[in-house]
Image (cartoon, rainbow, N blue to C red):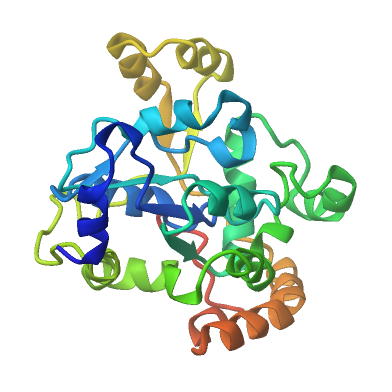
Amino acid sequence: MGDAGAKSGAKDFGERVPDFLIIGAKRSGTTWLNSMLEEHPEIYIGTKEIHYFDYQLDKGDGWYRAHFADAGPAQLAGEATQTYMFDREVPPEMARLVPEAKLIAALRNPVDRAYSDYWYNRARGIEDLSFEDALEAEGERGERYRKSYFSRGLYASQLRRVAEFYRRDQIAVFIFEEQVADPEHAYRGVCRYLGIDADFIPRTLGRPVNPTIQFRSLRFRALTNRSRSRVAKGLARLNQKHVGYPAMASRTRAALQERFAQANADLADWLGRDLEVWRDVTSAVDSAPDR
């Protein structure tokens, strides 16, 4: 195991904090990364989406540390909360408690990310506007609102905010479309970054783990969400059906691609790499499995 593992083992076992965090972006493969790493014997991941640094700070650092108390002394502890990168109030709080953590950002073509996010909300009864009207209304809804379809895709500004508190070598960026095209390569890259065995291959590698779904009954979903029992979870699965969503209107796609053009160029400059995979306006991945 690499240096990160050595640091992990040196910590007071009762005072564990995560060695790494998956910080975003929403609907960009964070659940897939979390699931792949969860299978790795050198990794311990507690509850997904703890939301400590954005919504749960009032519970105290001890509450947060308790999520990692069961991590083995030779394991790296981690968590994934896909809103951390977006929320401007999060980076200083993370740096206060986990200044040496490695951070992972999974990024998706912001046009497709926005549309996936929109349909995620529609399925849960959170959104009732059309996609175009929701984009128009975003400014009135506020930046931290969960319906921030456009602003969540302004990745360069978000990563620069994080980099004010973390060294650049503590921030690794992985591209969703490359992950879909070659999941094994993407997974091994994450393992190498974390300093764990990249030859361990998860059983579920390559399978979508967070597909687009619809709920047969939103009322029934609310009832099952209140219970953590195995029966409730089984019933919740029966209430779901895996579906695609309609292709985005070509005019909307072209307009969004233009709106994101400068932000994507800024991101490419910050990363020092080309983002050609995001430039083809007509190559929609509306029907690609969300991970």
For the N terminus, give its image quadrant: bottom left
For image coordinates 24% across by 31% down, the residue present is 70
Above or below residue 275? Residue 168 is: above
| Residue in the foreground of this view, choosing between 224 and 107 | 107
Residue 265 position within the rendered picture, expressed as x and y whole percent measured from the top left: 65, 85
Say if residue 176 shows up in the picture.
yes
For image coordinates 64% across by 71% down, the residue present is 160
Above or below residue 200? Residue 109 is: below
Above or below residue 152? Residue 192 is: below
Residue 113 position within the rendered picture, expressed as x and y whole percent measured from the top left: 58, 59
Q: Is residue 172 left or right of residue 44?
A: right
How many dots with numbers?
0
Residue 212 position within the rendered picture, expressed as x and y whole percent measured from the top left: 46, 44
Outermost left residue: 199
Above or below residue 192? Residue 270 is: below
For image coordinates 64% across by 61% down, the residue present is 248
Say if residue 172 shows up in the picture.
no
